[in-house]
Image: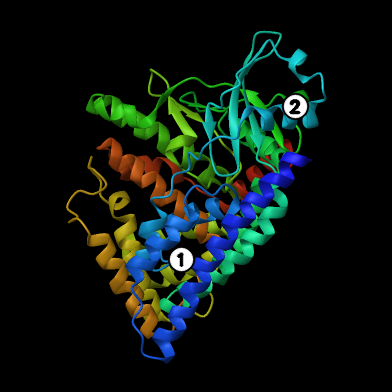
Amino acid sequence: MADEGDSLGGRLGRYARVGASVGGLAARLAGERYLGLSLDRDRHAAELRSALGGLKGPLMKAAQLLATIPDALPPEYARELAQLQANAPAMGWPFVRRRMATELGPDWPARFARFDKEAAFAASLGQVHRAVLPDGRNVAVKLQYPDMASALEADLNQLKLVFAVGQRLDPAIRTDEIHAEITNRLREELDYRREARHIDLYRHMLRDEPKVHVPEVVAEYSTDRLLTMSWLSGEPLLDWKKHSQEERDALAVNMFRAWYVPFYFYGVIHGDPHLGNYTVRPDASVNLMDFGCVRVFPPRFVRGSIELYRALMTDDEDRAVAAYEDWGFGGVSREMIAVLNRWAAFLYGPLMDDRPRRLTEGVAEGFGRDMAQNVFGELRRMGGVRPPREFVFMDRAAIGLGAVFIHLRASINWHRLFEGLIEGFELETLAGRQHQALAAAGLA
């Protein structure tokens, strides 16, 4: 289609800018390593963000992911990429009209009672329009941007360069598994039929959670590149910062259950806790949206998360070793485990404290960053460690959700909330429940 070809040509120019920026970083790095030249990381990280800014497509999405994955990139680059905005400018009406005609046929306007020309939301891979069906249902119509599938492979090649640079600058964390995980998830995220099945999966898993709402897919209005679902009305989460402590705490509990009931009961997690992916109803219940990035974990990985918590609570080193094995760490020495446990104790700290508290209580600003630098400095001295690929989106979800709780200044007994989720955990029960849920959603 002409508009897709023209758009691709324009994007290729931007890819060239990004390639030059990333390639320039690699060249400067070689100069630093072999010629004794100085590399201004802060300056070049800002240049890289500038090159990526405003770029639609998978590379923009990958950059946003990298900014929230601990130690995937050196801190200067993570800081800059974190400033990239997901709310990119929307494509215009000519694109929308052509995309809708391609997906639903030339008579598509007659299939709607109303269709808003202006996008309600726009992000890195697609945009959402509000519409009304002939039967009166309010729906969200999600359209994928042009030529995203072919752009993905080119972008993944650029991503390899970014990782190669990061690996040379800071070899404490080996990034090959991180790259493989991001590649798999981005390929899935372009498949809107798969996202529709993810929505069905979440409707199944959260059916007994009255304070969490999941949209319903309208299958006859959905294709590979078009996804239509019920519209969920609510306020932006940050608007709740002005509510009472009691209301903010209630919202935080609902957010906690929205993310971790699926994980600890079914081994599934929503891997993109971006502020734009949920809204809040007047009763503090949560609307979940955007199910492109969903991760299904082996049941043993869930067991490892619980066992490490138990090991830290009881100071049981053997139990910690078994937990890391469940997680997929291979060839990790006792010395490395002692270092990893220091980091784990920091992350699990609020869950181990049996009283209402804020996540950051008693933690000086910058302590987490300093702790991470210390821990990964020691890992570097020991030869580095390769995190299992499952860690990528588990870490992203935990850190993204933690940021929400900090925004809300929530004060909760995290320990009891967590203990209530994991009480009576059995590996076989989770495995059976997971299989049933995936089969029900057509994902088994």
Label 1 and label 2: CA atoms lie apart by 37 Å
Element assignment for label 2: helix
246 lies left or right of 171: left
144 lies left or right of 175: right
In the rendered image, residue 129, in percent from the top left (x then y), is placed at: 60, 25
How many numbered marks does the figure carry?
2
Instruction: Say few, some or many: other residues with alpha carbon within 10 Å of mark 1 (under 14 / 14 to 19 / 20 or more).
Output: many
- Depth check: give the residue in front, 317 or 159: 159
412 lies left or right of 54: left
Q: For residue 405, what is the image quadrant?
A: top left
In the rendered image, residue 160, in percent from the top left (x then y), is placed at: 58, 69
Tell me which label, 1 or 2, sits earlier in the chain: 1
Q: Residue at x 49, y 60 (%)?
A: 304
Is 301 situated above or below 73?
above
Residue 171 can be seen in this image: no
Mark 2 highlights which residue? 219
Looking at numbered disc 2 in the image, what kind of residue is underneath it? Ala
Q: Residue at x 44, y 44 (%)?
A: 85
Q: Which mark is residue 72?
A: 1
Q: How is the image coloured?
A: rainbow
Is 417 situated above or below 69?
above
